[in-house]
Image (cartoon, rainbow, N blue to C red):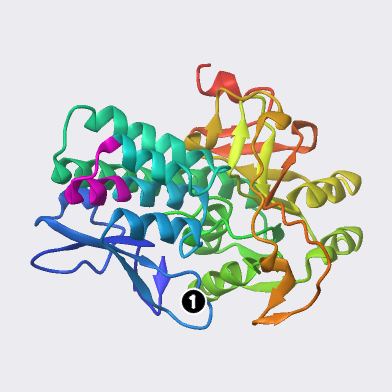
Amino acid sequence: MLVEGRWRRTIEPQRERSGFAGSRSAPEGERGGSIDHVIVLDQAKLPYAIEWLPLRTLADACRAIRDMHIRGAPLIGVTAAYGVALALREGIALDIACRELAATRPTAINLTWALGQMQETMAGFTDADAAFAKAGELADADVATCEAIGAHGAKLLQRERVNVLTHCNAGWLATVDWGTALAPIYKAHEAGVHVHVWVDETRPRNQGLLTAWELAQHGVPHTVIADNAGGHLMQEGKVDLCIVGTDRTTRNGDVCNKIGTYLKALAAHDNGIPFYAAVPASSIDWTVGEPREIPIEERSADEVRFVRGQQLTASPVANPAFDVTPRRYITGLITERGVATPATLQEMFGR
């Protein structure tokens, strides 16, 4: 990802002898020196300021995830993995660290997947360096996965000009690099396709502004729109396809994503517009078959009630963070193995 013209990752280990500025060409496993701490791009400060937040303890990692200094299911998972390593270095037991991290965000399946990977690797061991190494492997794997999603998804954009609508932020800010829903857009843009992105603002946290910020950093043409404008644009013939991310996908291809995604899928279906979700394997919950089985996070009412510190209403507020788009409205699932339909997802992964 480009941040002020430099290649960076959203999470970067900082070593005792030297820092790391990030590079697509240098996997974490190939860098020397002991890791002292990690830094994350503080998304709570974007797009107004670019600041890197140091994570030195388990508490720091939990806070960064819970308070959305970092967000996006893949990045949450990798951050949790580094949180385990930080905890072991503090002398905190593996099971306690995993339990505290798992409680931070209940919907994103990548979180529990990454913690499972760390538990499997570190069971019976307390070596923090080994835990940091495993977290680095997961970070590198996420980059490779997202780049593969980009390559497969870019094939859907092979035309002279294309208008894509996306919801929330599923770009490289939501992963270690490349992103999920935006990876095909970056690949197509770099291949010379004239791609333009309609960016939903995505209330109440306005995460579409993060999408706009990163697209601007990369030079991709885009337009920010109000959340409820998407259906109108589809009716006007100004949207060629939709690509969104996922926080959890059922084994049958139902997609849980940021609240408001379902409404976009309904509008796309009514207007005959293809609706795709970018789905890394780590976000598929093979234990869940139906939407009602997915826990939906209810976030603080203050996210809706307050804007810039000013209270807008004293009325009761509901603030569900996610909704589930039923499989019947999903045209395809863009994975690191290729593009599947909900009906062929299990076959693609040998399930």
Residue 99 figure quarter: top left
Residue 144 figure quarter: top left
- Is 294 above or below relative to 314? above
Q: Residue at x 55, y 63 (%)?
A: 189
Q: What secondary structure is marked by label 1?
A: loop
Does residue 204 show up? Answer: no
211 or 108: which is nearer to us? 108
The count of marks equals 1
Percent of width and height locating residue 22? 28, 64
- Is 129 above or below relative to 196? above
Q: Amino acid at mark 1?
A: Lys
Q: Is residue 259 left or right of residue 288?
A: right
- Magenta segment, principal secondary structure? helix
Tell whether position 90 is magenta: yes
Percent of width and height locating residue 209? 62, 72
Q: Is residue 19 left or right of residue 210?
A: left
Q: Which residues are magenta?
A: 83-94
Q: Residue at x 48, y 69 (%)?
A: 43
Q: Residue at x 66, y 43 (%)?
A: 296
Quadrant position of the N terminus in the picture: bottom left
Residue denoted by label 1: 45
Does residue 40 show up? Answer: yes
Q: Residues within 10 Å of mark 1 (few under 14, many from 20)?
A: few
- Is 304 above or below relative to 107? below
Percent of width and height locating residue 298? 67, 50
Tell whether position 162 is magenta: no
